[in-house]
Image (cartoon, rainbow, N blue to C red):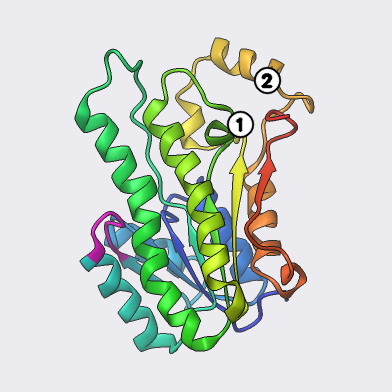
């Protein structure tokens, strides 16, 4: 029970096949009280209810600061504290740069990068008062290596790494850790849409020669949120089967 009685907020975690829900499930198993924040209120409540009665599902668009603040205030009203924040919410709108629209670029930055900023801004105030907390940001191997057709997504995920390092320096003196995870090629709904040829080419670039599972990411997120990782901050941990070497 690494996370017994900890209050954990996880964004973008309503999809039962996604990284966020896998993290939420493992957190609940490790004793945490889990708050799932996603766009759809019904889906968020259903995902939280599947974990048990003590968990909470809320609706918010993370790119909207007012909605984020309202959701966080609800968490405080119910639990009185926030020990863990996992910024998992993210979208893709892939296109070659010559064809990428301004809307495609802006939307990905708004959700992936500004969304993480909004959540960290509000939650960090709470953690500073507590003088404790763990923030884990979901980056990507694409933010480390780059990827053709994903200028917007790669920019957002590289930005997450920079924000992580900066905030780790801001909050470290108060006992708050801030880290990022860079997942590789993981079996989720997002990768299901890829063609078999694309999947085969990607597998060829992974030394372990297999796709990762959502639990591979969840286990790392759980470790970073526990006291076992108390002296780790400002780091980006790649969980990618060696893809980003």
Labelled disc at residue 185: 1
Q: Is residue 2 above or below residue 221?
A: below
Disc 2, disc 1: CB below 8 Å? Answer: yes
Please, what is the dominant secondary structure of the magenta stretch?
Answer: loop
Percent across and percent down for residue 84 are 54, 71
Q: Does the magenta stretch include residue 242?
A: no
Label located before the other in sequence (2 or 1): 1
Corner quadrant of residue 235: bottom right
- For residue 75, which quarter of the picture? bottom left
Q: Disc 2 on helix, strand or loop?
A: helix
Q: Position of residue 216 (x, y in %)?
A: 69, 47
Give percent across and percent down for residue 189.
47, 36
Which of 235 and 238 lies nearest the eye of the viewer?
A: 235
- Mark 2 neighbour class, 10 Å CA radius: few under 14, some 14 to 19, many 20 or more: some
- Number of numbered discs: 2
**Magenta stretch bounds:** 59-65
Q: Which residue is drawn at 57% across and 65% down?
A: 169
Residue at 68% over, 42% down: 238
Does residue 173 appear in the picture of this structure? yes
In the figure, residue 2 lies in which quadrant?
A: bottom right
Residue at 32% from the left image edge and 38% from the top image edge? 108
C-alpha gap between disc 2 and disc 1:
8 Å
Q: Badge 1: few (under 14), some or many (20 or more) residues near its Cα, within 10 Å? A: many
Q: In this view, does 103 lie to the left or right of 169?
A: left
Q: Name the residue under label 2.
A: 203
Looking at the figure, which quarter contains the C terminus? top right
Does residue 63 belong to the magenta stretch? yes
Q: What is the secondary structure assignment of the residue under circle 1?
A: loop
Classify the position of the N terminus by image quarter. Answer: bottom right
Figure check: 201 above or below 167: above
Indicate the position of residue 193 as horizontal and vertical percent values: 45, 24
Q: In this view, does 89 lie to the left or right of 5?
A: left
């Amino acid at each position: 029970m690494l996370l017994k009685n900890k209050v954990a907020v996880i964004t973008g975690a309503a999809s039962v096949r996604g990284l966020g829900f896998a993290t939420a499930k493992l957190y609940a198993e490790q004793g945490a009280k889990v708050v799932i924040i996603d766009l759809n209120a019904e889906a968020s409540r259903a995902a939280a209810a599947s974990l048990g009665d003590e968990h909470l599902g809320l609706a918010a668009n993370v790119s909207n600061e007012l909605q984020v603040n309202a959701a966080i205030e609800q968490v405080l009203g119910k639990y009185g504290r926030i020990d863990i924040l996992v910024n998992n919410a993210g979208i893709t709108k892939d296109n070659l740069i010559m064809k990428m629209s301004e809307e495609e670029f802006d939307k990905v930055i708004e959700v992936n990068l500004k969304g993480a900023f909004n959540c960290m801004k509000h939650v960090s105030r709470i953690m500073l008062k507590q003088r404790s907390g763990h923030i884990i940001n979901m980056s990507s191997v694409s933010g480390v290596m780059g990827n053709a057709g994903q200028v917007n997504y790669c920019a957002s995920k590289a930005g997450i790494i920079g924000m992580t390092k900066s905030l780790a320096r801001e909050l470290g003196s108060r006992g708050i850790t801030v880290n990022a995870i860079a997942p590789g090629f993981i079996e989720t709904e997002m990768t299901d849409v890829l063609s078999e040829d694309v999947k085969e080419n990607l597998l060829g670039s992974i030394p372990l020669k297999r796709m990762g599972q959502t639990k591979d990411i969840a286990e790392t997120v759980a470790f970073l949120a526990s006291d076992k990782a108390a002296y780790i901050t400002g780091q980006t941990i790649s969980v990618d089967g060696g893809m980003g070497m």
